[in-house]
Amino acid sequence: MRFLLDREQRAFAASLDALLTSADTPSVIRDWSRGEHGSGRALWRRIAEAGVFALAVPEEYDGMGPRPVELALAFVELGRHAVPGPLVETVTAAVLLDKTERLLPRLASGETMATVAYDSPYALDGDAATTRLALTPDGLHLAFGHGPVRPSLDPARRLTALTPGGELLTSTPPVEQALIWARLAVAAQALGVGLALLDRTVAYVGQRTQFGAPIGSFQAVKHRLADAKIALEFARPLLFGAALTMDSADIAAAKVTACEAAYTTARTALQLHGAIGYTAEHDLSLWLTKARALRTAWGTPDECRALVVSGGGRRS
């Protein structure tokens, strides 16, 4: 099957890329990592105005969705620019809230930033989120507070425990459907992270010299970059194919492929940058840590592979 984006979809991705390029996201990420959310919230509002969060919200609740292909396109760009915040969690919340009229329009407009605690007491960016949801055995709760911020592998992913209890919104939230959307968004975000890492590394090896020549001219370096490029390009059609079917096994395959491709590219980028790649001061680190964190977010590689082998939600 040949996947071609139409003109409107390409224009949407290009407009997001232009918006995020002008936003100086590295400085936003570093502010966010310190718990300074002003610049991040301002960027969040601009992303919402572009319609990103509305893609997961039905039209009857002031959204434009469900539009999973466009959402995947958007999250590739969000990953390419390493935008911080509970992006995946806000999309997941939109699915979990289903027909909750008082919350969904605010998610679509960007007025509300949501996070979700699933299969763990910790939620991403609970200190910044204005809507905190906790999935428990008895249903979906609206948590009223959070605990201290805990350090994470990615400094921009700030983990907080949600306060137990809170209003029970529904005893039967659509958890499986929410997982599908969460994993689709993570896969797209990881693909974007990997593409950014590859672009930055290709540019760097063209400038760094050894033995009087750019290291990018060495065959071993070319092979490493070619392997990373192939892995990312194989992930791309899996991602958009899964966005068309929204089948749980297809989504799991896309997630594990995109996340492993991004992780492989991160390792290659680190090796080819040398010592400077290990420094937190270098912008490369903002993408390196995110590639590692996304690898296990909303489903580990083993969990996703098991789902693919089992056939997931595929109907015969």
Image: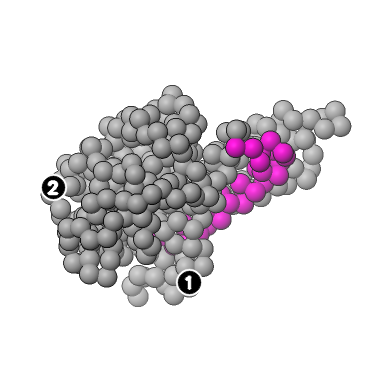
Total numbered labels placed on residues in the image: 2
Residue 8 at what x, y percent from top left? 34, 35
Q: Which residue is mark 1?
A: 306
Question: Which element type, helix, strand or loop, lies under badge 1?
Answer: helix
257 magenta-colored: yes
Disc 1 crowd, CA 10 A, few/some/many (<14, 14-19, 20+): some
Could you tell me which residue is drawn at 39 percent across and 70 percent down?
312
Query: Mark 2 sits on what residue?
Result: 102
Quadrant occupied by the N terminus: bottom left
Stretch in magenta: 251-280
Q: Position of residue 134 (x, y in %)?
A: 28, 59
Q: Are marks 2 and 1 in contact (CB under 8 Å)?
A: no
Q: Which residue is most to the top?
A: 22
Dot 2 or dot 1: first in sequence order is 2
Residue at the farthest front position:
148
Q: Nearer the viewer, mark 2 or mark 1?
A: 2
> Split into 4 quadrants, where in the image is the C terminus?
bottom left
Q: Is residue 146 left or right of residue 18?
A: left
- The spot of residue 141 in percent (x, y) is 22, 59
| Residue type, label 2 | Arg
Identified by mark 1, the residue type is: Ala
Furthest-right residue in this view: 211
Instruction: Give the structural element (helix, strand or loop) at label 2.
Output: loop
